[in-house]
Image (cartoon, rainbow, N blue to C red):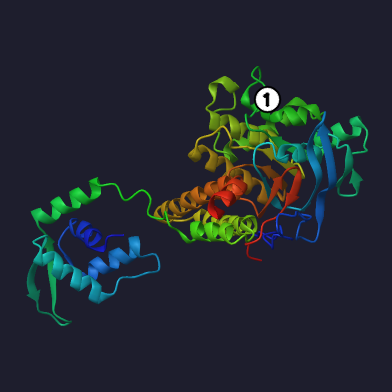
Amino acid sequence: MSVPQTLLGLLERGPSHGYDLKRDYDTYFGQGKPLRYSQVYATLSRLARDGKAAPGPIEQGAGPERRRYVITEIGMADVDQWLAEPAPPEPDLQSELFAKVVLALMLGRPAASYLDAQRGAHLQRMRELTDLKRGGEPLTVLLADHSIYRLEADLRWIDHTAARLDMLSKAVQQ
Amino acid sequence: MDRPHRGPAGHALKGGAAVTASSPGPTRLIEARDLILSFGSTPALRGASLGVGQGEIVAVMGPSGSGKSTLLHCMAGILTPDRGEVWFGAQRLDTMSDEHRSELRRNRFGFVFQYGQLVPELTAEENVALPLLLSGTRRGPAISAARDWFATLGLDGLQRRRSGELSGGQAQRVALARGMVARPEVLFADEPTGSLDSVSGELVMDLLTAAAREHGTTVILVTHDARVAAYADREVIVRDGVVGTLTGAKP
């Protein structure tokens, strides 16, 4: 998740305070990992330095000093470019799952048992996510689906790997 | 909604050795014990055991040719194992007369298969009413009971259509209504979403599990699709004709 571009995207909806951006980021994208205020303001300062956002005047009021930020033309072009670029398609190539299977095979440990345990854990998580979808808000369902499809991809890899363990075992022990 | 059977996955596969995949629930409604079945010289089941509790939804997974559909057909009394026992409550299916077993399938079991298998000459509501008509219910009450399912499954307005005039997802929902119309105690579903796109498949599974839970129906669901299995209370895996459960599931 690119925090600068995501905040910039939220800012394109209209001028916003850092507080509002943090709230919306946490609502839509935080999923239990809220942004720190310091991270929001540091990011906004960098976006302003790079000409992608412009700070408005400091607003005096009863509360702490606040200023609104406005996205610039450069900032909008940056959001355009970011949205058009596909994310890296293989971000998890060297995952723990992969490492455990390879090491189990190298060390002559029971890779099949590990794959079974992992399959069970993945299916359990898929059940929890499927439960979450029942009556969930559309964005909750969308996010749960994203996780479910990623888990399903892992499961396909697990099944495929389990069916080829003998051949793989010979390959890594050479 | 209560989901009383979402318990531990029973015993685990240890080092590839399969052990009995029993229901964790207190009341076992249907049970296969050490089933062995060969088609000619090809073994399909090699000691498969599975116990499923009252109201439980169990997914039977496994690779193609592993024996999962054969196990389902034995538990449903469609196939007879060479050895082993199938119990439905206190009744033993595998030694029952064909007539008695057919009666049981008509009155106590429901079925949903991959390709709906609707009768093309009949309307959707006649297809749904079919299990009731075959059990001797008169046409009027049977059609009336069938119609009740159309609103529940989002099929209003399609009662008079024939299967050729239904989309795949609609046809499969009609098949689900047919499987449930006689209020079966056990619903056997063999790849019920296998021919559907992901959105239609999700709708069928939502409706199938909701209807089963509402009526307390036990469901034995054969699938190779993990997203479909995730609707079940637990899953077992069939490999080389033997049933095992998986480690890693939380109690």
Q: Chain of mark 1?
A: B
Drawn side of residue B31 relative to residue B223, left or right = right
Please tell me which residue is depicted at 66% across the width and 55% down the height of the picture.
B233
Q: Is residue A129 visible?
A: yes
Q: Position of residue B70 (x, y in %)?
A: 76, 37
Front one among B133 and B239: B239
User: In the rendered picture of this protein, how many numbered marks are placed on residues?
Assistant: 1
Residue at the extreme top: B121
Percent x, y for residue A116? 63, 56
The residue sitting at the front extreme is A174
The amino acid pointed to by label 1 is Glu
* Label 1 Cα neighbours within 10 Å, binned few <14 / some 14-19 / many ≥20: many
* Residue A163 pos. (x, y %): 61, 45
Of all residues, the one furthest to the left in this rendering is: A57
Taking the image as shown, residue A112 lies to the left or right of residue B91, namely left
Q: Residue, x 87% and y 35% (percent of image)?
A: B101
Vertical relation: B200 (above or below) A6: above
In the image, residue B149 above or below residue A17: above
Using the rendered image of the protein, determine whether residue B76 is visible from the camera's viewpoint. no
Q: Quadrant of the N terminus of chain A?
A: bottom left
- Residue matched to label 1: B126
- Give the residue at x 63% y 65%: B250
Q: Nearer the viewer, residue B113 or B4?
A: B113
Circle 1 SS class: helix
**B144 or B57: which is nearer to us?**
B57
Q: Is residue B28 above or below residue B128?
A: below
Taking the spot 51% from the left edge, 51% from the top edge, the residue there is A154
